[in-house]
């Protein structure tokens, strides 16, 4: 089975930066893409950014120009550099790995942006 371990969340002031990391381990055969999603209590989980193993990226409009997703394929690790953070970026952020027919979620890491 695949496990995803997230780190890097925390409390930051508006305008600040955080870098989230997600390391995948376990029975990984191939990775189609990895990404980050976020969710507030009682709300739907929403896409933040994804990146394929070849490097193609997609971003939600709300984070374009502020967030950057990257990955280290050798380490099966994906990162999310979050700059110019806003209070509306306050969510639990979840790592996502999609392989060949299987998808996995991390436990989530809280990001709180204060005014």
Image (cartoon, helix red, strand yellow):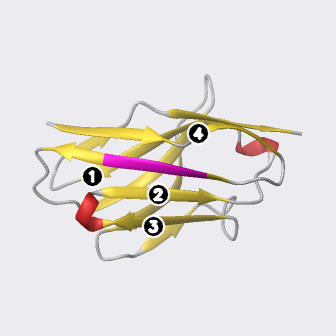
Verify CB contact (< 8 Å) between mark 4 and mark 3.
no
* Residue picked out by circle 1: 98
Q: Nearer the viewer, residue 38 or 1?
A: 1
Neighbours of disc 3 within 10 Å: few (<14), some (14-19), many (20+): many
Q: Position of residue 54 (x, y in %)?
A: 30, 76
Verify CB contact (< 8 Å) between mark 1 and mark 4.
no
Please give the range of residues in magenta: 19-23
Q: Earlier in the sequence, mark 1 or mark 3?
A: 3
Q: Nearer the viewer, mark 1 or mark 3?
A: 3
Verify CB contact (< 8 Å) between mark 3 and mark 2.
yes
| Furthest-right residue in this view | 115
Q: Which mark identifies residue 22?
A: none
In the image, what residue occupies the spot 27% across and 52% down? 98
Q: Nearer the viewer, residue 36 or 70?
A: 70
In the image, what residue occupies the spot 22% across and 60% down? 31
Q: Which mark identifies residue 79?
A: 2
* Residue picked out by circle 3: 70
Name which quarter of the figure residue 39 lies in.
Answer: top right
* Residue picked out by circle 4: 9
Neighbours of disc 4 within 10 Å: few (<14), some (14-19), many (20+): some
Provide the secondary structure element on which disc 3 rests: strand
Q: Nearer the viewer, residue 62 or 21?
A: 21
For the residues marked 1 and 2, what is the alpha-carbon distance in whole angstroms?
15 Å
Provide the secondary structure element on which disc 1 rests: strand
Q: Position of residue 13 (x, y in %)?
A: 82, 43
Neighbours of disc 2 within 10 Å: few (<14), some (14-19), many (20+): many
Provide the secondary structure element on which disc 4 rests: loop
97 magenta-colored: no
Q: Nearer the viewer, mark 1 or mark 2?
A: 2
Neighbours of disc 1 within 10 Å: few (<14), some (14-19), many (20+): some
């Amino acid at each position: 089975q695949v496990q995803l371990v997230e780190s890097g969340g925390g409390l930051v002031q508006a305008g600040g930066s955080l870098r989230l990391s997600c390391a995948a381990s376990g029975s990984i055969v191939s990775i189609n893409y990895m990404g980050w999603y976020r969710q507030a209590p009682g709300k739907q989980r929403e896409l933040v950014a994804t990146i394929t193993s070849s490097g193609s990226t997609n971003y939600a409009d709300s984070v374009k120009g502020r967030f950057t997703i990257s990955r280290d394929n050798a380490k099966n690790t994906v990162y999310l550099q979050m700059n110019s953070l806003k209070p509306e970026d306050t969510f639990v952020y979840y790592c996502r790995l999609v392989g060949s027919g299987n998808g996995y979620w991390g436990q989530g890491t809280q990001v709180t942006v204060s005014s």
